[in-house]
């Protein structure tokens, strides 16, 4: 989705067009001009034919944009920021900065798109009747009717209860209201989406090989796209569920060994090697009050400089680290880390005493992608064992290899992005 260009703003929201839209525009214009229009207006000139077809295609894109604006307006109404609306080959996306925090908002944002599409269908339908009353030609009448039909299709297709389609979000909101747990509802919605995506691809293949219709390829593309998007919905919900259920106290490294400010980075590396896992350590001088915090693996200096650079030269100062209560969820920590580059958290208990530290390494197991259906691949017993071991980071071989090259902040951003997409 990076090959986009901005065309302007509506309600302060940037509108972006993807280059793939050009393919749709050309294809659809040609289809209308060569195949559809000659059926009911065979005597028209090429100029009129192409002009009318192109006009109808533009009206179609405006319809898709109106659908997305429907979502966007209700999102803004619910205090959810809309980063941008982009139109691409398979429709539109309103990218939001976060998910709805109650079932009502989830429902309102989801239903708004199909409602707008239904209104557009009614609008084009009425326009057809009015144009007919004024004696408009078949060309105009058919294009208006086509626009009414396409908006109706947009509304109905999006109402299929399969996330990330709008109907899937409506289903999610309904389950959420009746079951109480947002993420479980989203996992169910995503699974319905996955099942529907598989169905679409199967139908597309039957259509392609049995009836030999090339439009089936478009259907297959929609199916594949929906499948990946549904997978993203499920994964984001599972990860958020884990992050919400785990507290800072459970993942922190309790009372990490502090280091004197004159310790060299090489000595720190050695300490970390002995500890077997990356730990945020307090840096002290004379008093127990930390001057700052250091994580060996996060110090990016030349190998040779590690032997003479002292930790106080490269440490993170106390005002740059996040202070959180041991009751806070890991989700709170990661949300803060997205805007805070240090990615160190100090855990404070309810008496105001520092009891441990957390870095990306202590939470990365919680960010492991679950499988297609939303289950975590790692062994259940190992999971249980680490849950019963408060104060230690949870490290398992598989998880480490899967996430070692993902920085936590970026990972969280990815989850957030996957989580806040509406079709
Ligand atoms: Zn929609």
Image: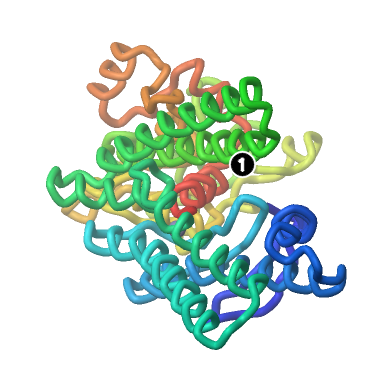
Residue 48 location, quadrant: bottom right
Question: Measuring 51% from the left and 34% from the top, which residue is drawn there?
Answer: 227
Q: Is residue 216 visible?
A: yes
Circle 1: is it few (<14), some (14-19), or many (20+) Cα within 10 Å?
Answer: some
Q: How is the image coloured?
A: rainbow
Rendered location of residue 178, percent (x, y) = 12, 47
Q: Is residue 350 left or right of residue 389?
A: left
In the rendered view, would you say 157 is above or below 396? Answer: below
Q: Does residue 253 appear anywhere in the picture?
A: no
**Figure quadrant, ligand 1:** bottom left
Question: Would you say 134 lies left or right of 121 here?
Answer: right
Q: Is residue 58 above or below residue 372?
A: below
Q: Is residue 121 above or below residue 270?
A: below
* Residue located beneath label 1 in the image: 298
| Residue lying at 36% horizontally and 51% vertically, measured from the top left | 159
Q: In this view, which residue lies farthest toward the bottom? A: 134
């Amino acid at each position: 989705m990076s090959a986009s260009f901005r065309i302007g703003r509506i309600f302060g929201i940037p509108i972006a067009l993807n280059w793939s839209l050009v393919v749709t525009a050309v294809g659809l214009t040609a289809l209308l001009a060569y195949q559809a229009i000659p059926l009911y207006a065979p005597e028209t000139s090429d100029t009129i034919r192409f002009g009318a077809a192109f006009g109808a295609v533009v009206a179609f894109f405006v319809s898709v944009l109106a659908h997305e604006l429907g979502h966007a307006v209700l999102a803004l109404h619910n205090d959810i920021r809309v980063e941008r609306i982009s139109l691409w080959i398979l429709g539109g996306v309103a990218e939001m900065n976060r998910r709805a925090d109650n079932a009502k908002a989830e429902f309102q944002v989801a239903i708004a798109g199909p409602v707008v599409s239904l209104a557009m269908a009614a609008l084009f339908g009425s326009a057809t009747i009015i144009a007919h009353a004024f004696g408009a030609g078949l060309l105009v009448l058919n294009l208006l009717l086509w626009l009414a039909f396409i908006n109706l299709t947009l509304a109905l297709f999006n109402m299929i209860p399969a996330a990330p389609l709008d109907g899937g979000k409506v289903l999610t909101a309904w389950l959420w209201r009746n079951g109480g747990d947002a993420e479980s509802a989203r996992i169910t919605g995503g699974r319905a989406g996955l099942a529907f995506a598989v169905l679409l691809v199967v139908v597309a293949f039957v259509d392609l090989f049995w009836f030999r219709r090339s439009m089936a390829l478009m259907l297959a593309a929609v199916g594949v796209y929906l499948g990946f998007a549904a997978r993203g919905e499920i994964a984001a919900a599972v990860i958020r569920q884990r992050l919400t259920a785990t507290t800072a106290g459970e993942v922190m490294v309790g009372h990490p060994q502090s280091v004197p400010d004159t310790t060299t980075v090489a000595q720190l590396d050695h300490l970390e090697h002995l500890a077997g896992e990356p730990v945020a350590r307090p840096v002290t001088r004379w008093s127990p009050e930390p001057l700052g915090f250091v994580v060996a693996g996060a110090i990016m200096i030349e190998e040779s400089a590690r032997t003479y650079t002292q930790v106080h030269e490269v440490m993170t100062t106390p005002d740059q680290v996040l202070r959180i209560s041991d009751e806070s969820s890991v989700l709170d920590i990661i949300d803060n880390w997205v805007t805070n580059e240090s990615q160190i958290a100090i855990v404070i208990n309810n008496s105001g005493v520092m009891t441990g530290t957390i870095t990306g390494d202590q939470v990365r197991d919680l960010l492991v992608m679950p499988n297609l259906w939303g289950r975590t691949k790692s062994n259940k017993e190992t999971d249980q064992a680490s849950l019963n071991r408060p104060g230690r980071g949870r490290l398992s071989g598989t998880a480490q290899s899967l996430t070692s090259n993902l920085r936590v902040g970026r990972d969280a951003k990815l989850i957030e992005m996957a989580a806040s997409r509406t079709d």
